[in-house]
């Protein structure tokens, strides 16, 4: 299962322990090695840092499996992109600057920013 842990951390991070959240964040948002993660976490041992990361990843997968928020977010994002493409194609085929089309495209952008 190829998970996007950075996204899962954004969604569920507050549900992890502090150490789990920090270890996963340092791995996937800062791209640090295990040694660097251990050092950043106050000089804990590498096995302790690895354990925190693995437990955090496992918990994030469990939460996503149970709640599916990341899956739904990705699906909605894909649907918005598809709708944006259709509206843009309609605007291009009509050959005129339509206020309603512009408003729809602006709404799509606002929705994407809110996600």
Image (cartoon, rainbow, N blue to C red):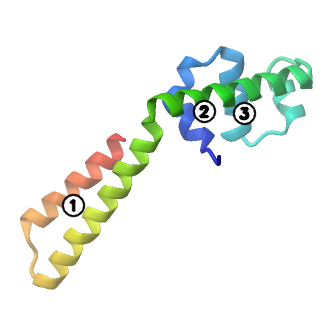
* Image quadrant occupied by the C terminus: top left
* Residue 35: image location, x then y, percent: 90, 32
How far apart marks 3 and 1 lie (CA) works out to: 36 Å
Residue shown at 26% from the left, 64% from the top? 84
Residue shown at 49% from the left, 28% from the top? 66
Disc 1 designates what residue?
A: 105
* Residue 81: image location, x then y, percent: 33, 61
* Residue 46: image location, x then y, percent: 91, 26
Left of 71 or right of it: where is 54? right
Relative to 38, say whether 87 is above or below: below
Relative to 18, say whether 90 is above or below: below
Q: Which mark is residue 61?
A: 2
Q: Which mark is residue 3?
A: none
Looking at marks 1 and 2 on the same chain, the residue that comes earlier in the sequence is marked by 2
* SS assignment at label 3: helix
How far apart marks 1 and 2 lie (CA) works out to: 34 Å
Foreground: 62 or 33? 62
Disc 3 designates what residue?
A: 26
Circle 3 residues within 10 Å: few <14, some 14–19, many ≥20:
many
Looking at marks 3 and 1 on the same chain, the residue that comes earlier in the sequence is marked by 3
Foreground: 97 or 11? 11
Residue shown at 16% from the left, 76% from the top? 90
In the figure, residue 99 lies in which quadrant? bottom left
Left of 59 or right of it: where is 11? left
Left of 29 or right of it: where is 115? left
In the figure, residue 49 lies in which quadrant? top right
Looking at marks 2 and 3 on the same chain, the residue that comes earlier in the sequence is marked by 3
Left of 40 or right of it: where is 25? left
Between label 2 and label 3, give the one nearer the viewer.
2
Circle 1 residues within 10 Å: few <14, some 14–19, many ≥20:
some
* SS assignment at label 1: helix
* Residue 27: image location, x then y, percent: 74, 37
């Amino acid at each position: 299962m190829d998970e996007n842990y950075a996204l899962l951390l954004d969604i569920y991070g507050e549900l992890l322990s502090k150490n789990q959240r920090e270890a996963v964040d340092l791995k996937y948002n800062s791209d640090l090695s295990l040694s660097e993660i251990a050092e950043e976490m106050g000089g804990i041992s590498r096995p302790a840092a690895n354990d925190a990361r693995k437990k955090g990843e496992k918990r994030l997968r469990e939460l996503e499996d149970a709640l599916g928020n990341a899956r739904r977010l990705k699906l909605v994002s894909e649907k918005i992109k598809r709708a944006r493409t259709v509206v843009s194609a309609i605007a291009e085929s009509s050959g005129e600057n339509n206020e309603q089309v512009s408003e729809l495209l602006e709404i799509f952008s606002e929705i994407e920013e809110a996600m």
